[in-house]
């Protein structure tokens, strides 16, 4: 599971870490204790038709566990469709060597960045279109 964070001004997403899903909740709790966390965004697996995929139940369960453990931090979801494919393409374009491109951890980190950046851009678009 890739973890990304943004700067204070919410301009750019940056890769933070890659964790096994079983360790993610403890990591988030430790991170939130040490840093100001305004929101947690969880990738929602969605089918091409826009409906939640079979894996979406796991994402919803993870969100419920976050809300239980960190009740003061809002949790939102964002469509994670195509983020792995976009991450693989970005890794190729960055000139990463072929063997390193096979790293699932690298793909997960870049995917998390892409998803968070897309989420922030979507939120800014929603804000400006409401005015």
Image: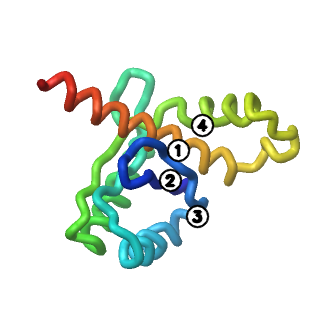
User: Disc 3 designates what residue?
Assistant: 19
Q: How is the image coloured?
A: rainbow
Neighbour class for label 3 at 10 Å: few (<14), some, many (≥20)?
some
User: Considering the numbered disc 1 on the image, is that residue within a helix, a strand or a loop?
Assistant: helix
* Marks 2 and 4, how far apart at CA: 14 Å
User: Disc 2 designates what residue?
Assistant: 4
- In depth, the one of 100 and 9 nearer the eye is 9
User: Disc 4 designates what residue?
Assistant: 84
The residue under the point 37% across, 72% down is 32
Q: Where's the N terminus, which quadrant?
A: bottom right
Q: Earlier in the sequence, mark 2 or mark 4?
A: 2
The residue under the point 48% across, 32% down is 81
- In depth, the one of 127 and 47 nearer the eye is 127
- In depth, the one of 66 and 130 nearer the eye is 130
Dot 1 and dot 2 residues touching (CB under 8 Å): yes
Q: With respect to residue 29, does 47 lie above or below?
A: above
Neighbour class for label 1 at 10 Å: few (<14), some, many (≥20)?
many
Q: Earlier in the sequence, mark 1 or mark 4?
A: 4
Q: Where's the C terminus, which quadrant?
A: top left
User: Disc 1 designates what residue?
Assistant: 113
Q: Is residue 57 left or right of residue 71?
A: right
The residue under the point 52% across, 46% down is 112
User: Considering the numbered disc 3 on the image, is that residue within a helix, a strand or a loop?
Assistant: loop
* Marks 1 and 4, how far apart at CA: 11 Å
Dot 3 and dot 2 residues touching (CB under 8 Å): no
Q: How many marks?
A: 4
Q: Nearer the viewer, mark 3 or mark 1?
A: 1
Q: Earlier in the sequence, mark 4 or mark 3?
A: 3
């Amino acid at each position: 599971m890739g973890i990304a964070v943004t700067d204070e001004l919410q301009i750019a997403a940056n890769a933070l870490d890659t964790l096994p899903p079983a360790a993610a909740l403890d990591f988030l709790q430790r991170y939130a204790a040490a840093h100001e966390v305004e929101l947690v965004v969880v990738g929602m697996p969605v089918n091409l038709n826009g409906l939640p995929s079979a894996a979406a139940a796991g994402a919803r369960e993870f969100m419920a566990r976050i809300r239980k453990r960190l009740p003061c931090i809002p949790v939102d979801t964002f469509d994670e469709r195509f983020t792995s494919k976009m991450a693989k393409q970005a890794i190729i374009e960055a000139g990463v060597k072929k063997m390193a491109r096979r790293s699932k951890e690298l793909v997960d980190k870049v995917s998390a960045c892409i998803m968070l950046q897309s989420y922030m851009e979507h939120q800014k678009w929603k804000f400006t279109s409401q005015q």
